[in-house]
Image (cartoon, grey):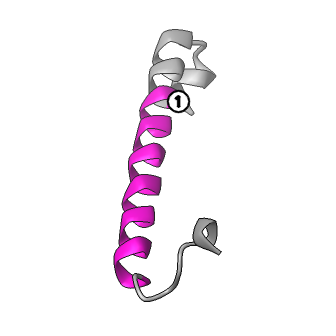
Amino acid sequence: MSAQGILNVDQAWVILVVLAVISVFLDCGVRALETYVLRWRPNPGEL
C-alpha cells in the first residue's frame, strides 16, 4: 500500500508477484493435503 501511495510502481509489482507465488504454493500445499487426508474418496476423474 505504501509503495502504491508514493507511486513506486516497481515495488508494487514485485509485491504482487510475490503474493501470487505464495498463493500458488499455498494452493498446491492444500491440494496435496486434501489428497492425503481424503485418499479414501475416489478421484472425480475415475467415476
Q: Main secondary structure of the magenta part?
A: helix
Q: Quadrant of the N terminus?
A: top right
Give the magenta part as a residue range.
16-38
* Image location of residue 15, percent across then percent down: 46, 29
Q: Quadrant of the C terminus?
A: bottom right
Q: Nearer the viewer, residue 5 or 10?
A: 10
Which residue, given by chain and number where applicable, does mark 1 sit on?
16
Residue 30 against residue 36 in the figure, above or below = above
Q: Is 46 inside the magenta-drawn segment?
A: no
Residue 34 against residue 9 in the figure, above or below = below
Q: Nearer the viewer, residue 5 or 22?
A: 22
Q: Nearer the viewer, residue 38 or 21?
A: 38
Tell me which residue sits at (50%, 37%) in the image.
20
Residue 45 against residue 19 in the figure, above or below = below
Tell me which residue sits at (58%, 70%) in the image.
46
* Image location of residue 38, percent across then percent down: 44, 83
Tell me which residue sits at (60%, 13%) in the image.
7
Spot the residue most to the front: 47
Residue type at the position of mark 1: Leu
Q: Is 33 inside the magenta-drawn segment?
A: yes
